[in-house]
Amino acid sequence: MFARPLSFLDISIMFSRLIQSPISRRQIIQFGVVSMCLYLAPSLVLAGTTFGIYDARTLAMGSTSVASANNGNGQFYNAALLAFNEDIEERTQDGRFYLPLFVPQLSESTINLEELFNDDPEQAISRAISSFNASPDTLTAQAVADASGSFNSSLAKLNGEDLYTDFFVGMGGGEAGKHRGAGFFFGVRFLAGGQSSISAADLTLLAAYEEGLTFVASNGLQGVAHPELFDANGALLDPGNNFDSSASAIGAVLSEAGVAMSRQFSFFGEPIAAGISLKVQTVDTFEDVERIVDDRIDVDQNGDYDAKLNFDLGFAKEIGDHWRVGLAIKDVIPRNYRTSRNTIIRLRPRARIGAALKSGRFLFTADADVTQNVPIGTESPTQEIAVGAEWDLDLPIQLRAGFRHDILGHRAGIASVGVGTLWRRIAVDIAVAGSSDTKAAALQMGIAF
């Protein structure tokens, strides 16, 4: 028999009871104070990429992970979190194996650029001009005006915009024993950044075609006459290869395979967990600049393949019955990679701190980049803080939400939501996230053991 669906009133009553509890209210205030401390964390070093999002749960919770990851994803973010089980592994089903992990993140401008490639507006204008020259009338003139206006609008939307892509696909798993844990992971992360360079001459030329052919289509009632667009015989000239707008991309395909290990130990009488993720990284770099109107950026054109050892470090500590704090450093060994055009891509250590507050069925989290993320290409740098929450329902379902904010102000804040479920031994998690300039989604499937 199925339980009745939760109504908005049910949710409101549950939330009201949570905040009316003196203990919960105090804990939430403490959580806010810690979040503010994370917000004020200073920038220590520079990094070549962001900390990374590798699974649906983390994306849904605003990218928070350093103190809140679990046995399914701790090996990606903070291996120390695998060491918090209180029982031996044979007595639990807390182990997880996930395949696939799938997390695409794209800037809105990258999506717009791909749509522009697919629409092929230069050919649309050429076809409209051919139709007009074959049969010049108001309908064919309006078709040229519409095609020119659409192309002009698409280019203007891209003008000066950052282009960035962060796409991860992989697999991983973890199993925690009593005060110790281990995990493994394999994945490929596609990172690219760049900018579009829209020519003012292109915008002016397209505006002239839109105005001039609107003038013809309206019999001179609208638009502006542009006789320079016609040849001596009155045929409309095709702008053809006169467009110079371009887009650039610099990036890397980063493949990683590794294992994670963690254990709790006593430090000056206080229990603390430490973990390490040892991994082999292979990096294939690329760089390209292409005209927007008739060429695609070719990520296979340029390459500099290399394979190196690297490792991540993580630390975590529980404070009382409700709090956990963490620190993680990814890619401790700095590396430089050179593209075939001699551009240097820097892969630097990236540090992040986090805090998590567990109150009944609610989990509240906050993370902050200690490092400023220098762009991989020519896009703007970022440094993020993030907050998230997870609500474990009576049903085998977890509802999640989060928000991340770039304190440098170069990207809009990103809101996210997601849901996860464990049915028998099958785990499924999905998430979506978005802002005015970024779109992201995630899917993962796995088993509990």
Image (tube, grey):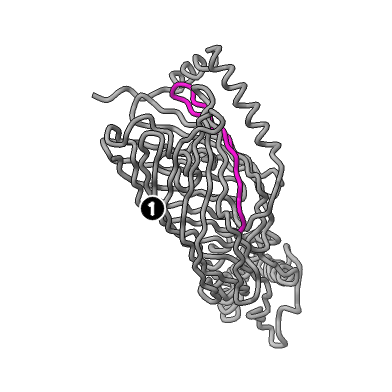
Give whichever of 46, 423 is nearer the camera.
46
Residue placed under numbered mark 1 in the picture: 171
User: Which picture quadrant has residue 341?
Assistant: bottom right
Start-end of magenta stretch: 348-367
Rendered residue at 55%/69% (across/down): 285
Q: Main SS type for the magenta part? A: strand
Direction from residue 84 to residue 166 in the image, left or right: right
Q: How many marks?
A: 1
Q: Residues within 10 Å of mark 1 (few under 14, many from 20)?
A: many
x and y, in percent, of residue 422 in the image: 32, 36
Q: Is residue 56 visible?
A: no
Give whichever of 140, 187 is nearer the camera.
187
x and y, in percent, of residue 449 in the image: 28, 40
Does the magenta run of residues contain 359? yes
Q: Amino acid at mark 1?
A: Met
Q: Is residue 287 visible?
A: yes
Q: Looking at this rendering, what residue extends furthest in the front direction?
A: 268
